Image: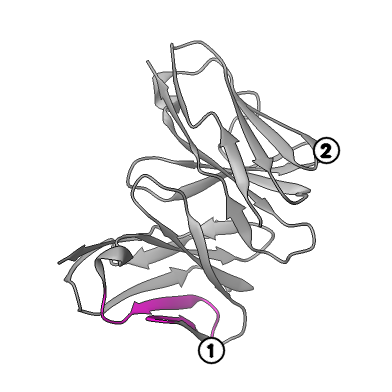
Amino acid sequence: GQQVMQIPQYQHVQEGEDFTTYCNSSTTLSNIQWYKQRPGGHPVFLIQLVKSGEVKKQKRLTFQFGEAKKNSSLHITATQTTDVGTYFCAGRATDKLIFGTGTRLQVFP
Amino acid sequence: GAVVSQHPSWVICKSGTSVKIECRSLDFQATTMFWYRQFPKQSLMLMATSNEGSKATYEQGVEKDKFLINHASLTLSTLTVTSAHPEDSSFYICSARLDFGGETQYFGPGTRLLVL
């Protein structure tokens, strides 16, 4: 079945450093979504990418959808302690949204 | 807008009892709702797609007789964990998709179930 993997699984950074998580799907996606889940909380929608090669920015966050629509990345510039949490990509191939394995980000002040 | 609530937020029960979890879309109609399960430090696993007025669609490996889903109205879906066992202890999260709002899913706050 469809699988969505993310790397790295964990990332610890010093506040101010950059962070990137990569998402890879075993199948071509119609779109990809990114979510953030704070410890003890529920996933919160960040963004959706639809077009091949699409790049979207939200303040310090940059999201990219690969040309083949099978991979995506999330880059955070100059991390802050408020960025702590687990970032999930979620790919849609059919009618279902399949969540990636997640990358847990820890930011040290 | 697009708020989804879940009730209860916490459940502790004895093995063998059944637990019902409610998922409500508070300010929008949702023909389709989704139920996920998340074990500690793991990803969200889709259990089933709940469709208003029809039977739920279960993912492979999810027992439909174990996890009963009822989507009786456009704003409410319920998940009943029947004869719960300790291995059913998990974080259950529902999400709802706006009927006319594209593919964004709005997640409820989740329900933590602990079966003793």
Q: Amino acid at mark 1?
A: Gly
The percent coordinates of residue A35 (x first, y second) are 47, 62
Task: Identify the mark at residue B13; answer none if there is no mark.
Answer: none
Between A73 and B8, the one nearer to me in the picture: B8
| Residue tagged 2 | B54
Stretch of the chain drawn in magenta: A59-79
- Give neighbour class at mark 1: few <14, some 14-19, many 20+ (Cα, 10 Å): some
Residue at left 41%, top 63%?
A: A5
What color scheme is it? one colour
User: Per the image, is B101 magenta?
Assistant: no
Residue at left 49%, top 58%?
A: A44
Task: Name the chain letter of the residue that bears numbered label 1.
Answer: A
Q: Check the image and report above or below for B80 versus A9.
A: above
- Give neighbour class at mark 2: few <14, some 14-19, many 20+ (Cα, 10 Å): few
Taking the image as shown, residue A50 lies to the left or right of residue A78, namely right
Q: Helix or strand or loop: what does disc 1 sit on?
A: loop
* Distance from the alpha carbon under mark 1 to that under mark 2: 38 Å
Q: Check the image and report above or below for A63 versus B44.
A: below
Between A27 and B25, the one nearer to me in the picture: B25
Residue at left 41%, top 77%?
A: A73
Residue at left 56%, top 45%?
A: B108
Which quadrant is home to the C terminus of chain B?
Answer: top left
Which quadrant is home to the N terminus of chain B?
Answer: bottom right
Task: Name the chain letter of the residue that bears numbered label 2.
Answer: B
| Residue tagged 1 | A53
Cβ–Cβ under 8 Å for marks 1 and 2: no
The percent coordinates of residue B89 (x first, y second) are 42, 27
The percent coordinates of residue A92 (x first, y second) are 61, 65
User: Per the image, is A64 magenta?
Assistant: yes
Taking the image as shown, residue B114 lies to the left or right of residue B24, namely left
The percent coordinates of residue B51 (x first, y second) are 77, 43
Between A60 and A74, the one nearer to me in the picture: A60
